[in-house]
Image (spheres, grey):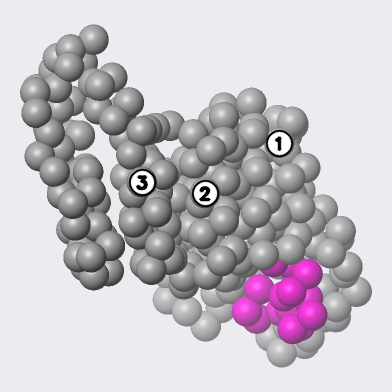
Amino acid sequence: MTGNDIDERIKKHFATFDRAEFAGWLKKGLRDSYSPSRDSENPHPFDPVYPEIVYQDMVGDYVTVPDFLGRVYDKFFSDSGKQMFRGAIGDVLSSQINQTELTAEAFKDLIYLIPTVSAEESLDSLVSFEGETKSGKGDLYATLAVLRHFKPSKTVYEATERLADSSNFDEGYLFEVIGILVENQPFNTGNILRRFEPRIEKLRNSIPDDVKEREAFSRAKRDCFRRVSGITDVVQYGGTWLTQDYGPLKVK
């Protein structure tokens, strides 16, 4: 069987999938990728697709799961299949909010798969998972990186807002959230800064009497200022807390 024959067989295999089948295939592959019982005699986790097929015309090996799945997506899925697969990523995340089927590594692969295939339709599910999961397997840093990856849109803005208001959110990432929100709605910068001012003040007052902690806060604020000032006009942020120098920090 030639390489073209194999490619056509795999395309036909995925052509029969609906969204639920894509979700099941993806979840099983992620679970099996990190299974302690996996050995060389078992089929590849994402059967019937193997690295030798996906990377046959390339120098180098399959490096990461998101890269591998991104290439499978480009090479073997139809346009309708791609749409269903992008939605299936969110379905897997939603199914795992109260489950522990997947490892933390598998969840990270799933999160970074979203920008790999531009699955903006799964951002809402990503934020629900990150904001609500009690598994301890979320990754706030990765989630914010994914949100920042996408072009400005109402979807990204609302997802970022919802993440910042979730029970799992770490206030140490407030400056990053402000930056993403301003990037998505620069015309709304003044309202964004006013909305988060009480939380920034509370964060500032919670910093212990530690030089490194205080420097980290000041550095994050400066970085936020540079980011905001590079996006919008000074009329939006001038005279706000972002441009003010803080006095001595309160000690806990």
Q: Label 3's element?
A: helix
Residue drawn at point x = 28 percent, y = 62 percent:
236
> Can you give x and y, in whole percent of width and height, for residue 195 in the image?
41, 44
At x 79%, y 80%, the residue is: 80
* Amino acid type at mark 1: Ile
Please state if 194 lies on the left or on the right of 133 as rendered: left
Instruction: Label 2: state its secondary structure.
Output: helix
Q: Percent x, y for residue 169? A: 49, 34
Mark 3 closeness class: few <14, some 14–19, many ≥20 residues within 10 Å: some
Q: Position of residue 78 (x, y in %)?
A: 76, 83
- Label 3, label 1: how far apart the Cα atoms are: 32 Å
Residue occupying image coordinates x 78% and y 69%: 84
Badge 2 amino acid: Glu
Segment colored magenta: 73-86
The residue under the point 44% across, 50% down is 144
Q: In the rendered image, is residue 181 in sight?
A: yes
* In the depicted structure, whether residue 142 falls above or below residue 118: above
Tell me the CA gap for discs 2 and 3: 14 Å
Q: Which mark is residue 97?
A: 1
Picture quarter with the C terminus:
top left
* Viewer-side residue, 35 vs 3: 35
Q: Is residue 90 left or right of residue 218?
A: right
Q: Select label 1 or label 2 by which is in front.
A: 2
Residue at mark 2: 161
Q: State the SS at label 1.
A: loop
Residue 179 belongs to magenta span: no
Q: CA distance from mark 1 to mark 2?
A: 19 Å
Characterize the magenta stretch by its predominant secondary structure.
helix
Tell me where residue 71 sits by quadrant.
bottom right
